Image (cartoon, rainbow, N blue to C red):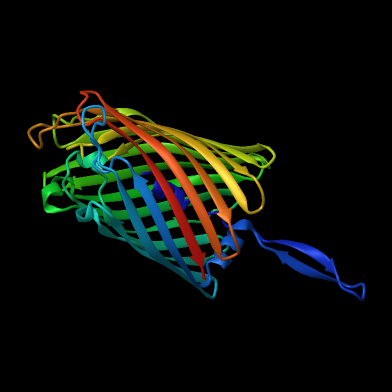
Amino acid sequence: MAAALSGASIVAAVPSVLHAQNDDGTTVQKRVQTPEEEKRLKQYGLHLTAGLDLLYDDNVYRVDDRVENPTDDLIVTPSVEATFGRPIGRHDILLRGKIGYDRFISEGQRSKLRLDTEAKANIRFGATCLITPRAAYRQQRADYGDINSATENLQKFATIGADFTCERPGLFPVASYEHDTTRNAAAFDYADQTSDTFMGGVGYSMPSLGTLTAYYERVNSKRDTLGIENRINSYGVRFQRAVTPITQIDADLRWLDVNSDSAAVGGYNGLGWKVSLSTQAIPRLKLTATTERAIINDSLIASGFAIDTSYRIQGEFSISELTSAGLYAEWDRRKFRQDAALRPYSITADRNRRFGAMLTRKLSDRFDLTLDAQHYVRRTDTSVSNYSGTQVMLGAALHF
């Protein structure tokens, strides 16, 4: 839900100008690019990345390791990613595609092709107005933590939509539309879903204040196989501001009004949020804290919807220009709205925790390595489908 708003909040900054002195004493104007412009220019042209990830997981089937012997495995994932950007006058098109294959060394039946593609265009008109049509497709193997059985499921996600904004100092409009589909294997077609998201609002921007946006968002989510629809009405305010040059706050607060065709699933009325605070008050160290409460319709567990509340803290330390390290911790609690007449269920809530560390080393302008280790724990309200485990991933990327 928050993705629609963040996609619509696109800043159109006015380029600044500096004066440089030539050898003969005369001065010429030099245009200074904004961070948004620099990022956009880097996306132009064709860029290729070849990657290889080695992931060790000591509990690939997510069984309760306190009562069963978990199965470990090494997953080898070679991948190739291509990005292409091209300016067309004031406008531009951006394409991205990544293909990989998750190869399980011991549990070969789990091996699956992984795809992730995206296409979008930035169409500019007027002084600051921007329309961004976009489309994306992704397919991946489902995590056993949500399946809770040793059965394979290849998930396919497709998105098409567009964002509109005319951000400028003072008042400006924002709007977006998104159509999403989720498709699963036949054994899990109860989770197939088609959603339409509409958002419209008014923003207000001032350099001394930041950007404040008031909006209304509507999500209609249909469970195609189960034959029910969940509807979410959100009334929200989003605030973005660099409090100081080293501190950034991004807060999205909304009132959620959720209802379902199923009387057993029922509704939900309450506060939703996504708040992030980051600071670099300590040199070379960036600290970030994030919390979110959202309604999740796309779930392999709930026949209705899930109320998801999560927290994350992360620290990133720059050891040198070429090496960085980080620590993070995540807590997540989900409450599932179920209907036994639609699908039997054994849990109504769960808690998930993850603790991890990262190390990144840039060996050259084209080659870098990443090491990521994490421990995960899940506990449910009925003690059914509990699990815990550890993952260690070594990744290498070569950029062309």
Quadrant location of residue 113? bottom left
Tell me what residue is drawn at x 17 percent, y 44 percent. 150
Q: Is residue 21 left or right of residue 362?
A: right
On the question of residue 12 being in view, the answer is yes
Quadrant location of residue 94? bottom left
Tell me what residue is drawn at x 74 percent, y 62 percent. 17
Vertical side of 367 occupied by 22: above or below: below
Q: Nearer the viewer, residue 377 or 60?
A: 60
Tell me what residue is drawn at x 51 percent, y 46 percent. 203
Residue 30 x %, y %? 76, 68
Q: How many marks?
A: 0
Residue 101 x %, y %? 31, 61
Q: Residue furthest top?
A: 382
Q: Quadrant of the N terminus?
A: top left
Q: Nearer the viewer, residue 30 or 96?
A: 96
Q: Nearer the viewer, residue 360 or 315?
A: 360
Residue 324 x %, y %? 59, 47
Q: Is residue 379 left or right of residue 277?
A: left
Residue 186 x %, y %? 11, 52
Tell me what residue is drawn at x 15 percent, y 53 percent. 185
On the question of residue 96 being in view, the answer is no
Vertical side of 272 occupied by 284: above or below: below
Q: Residue furthest left?
A: 341
Vertical side of 351 occupied by 11: above or below: below
Q: Residue furthest right?
A: 25
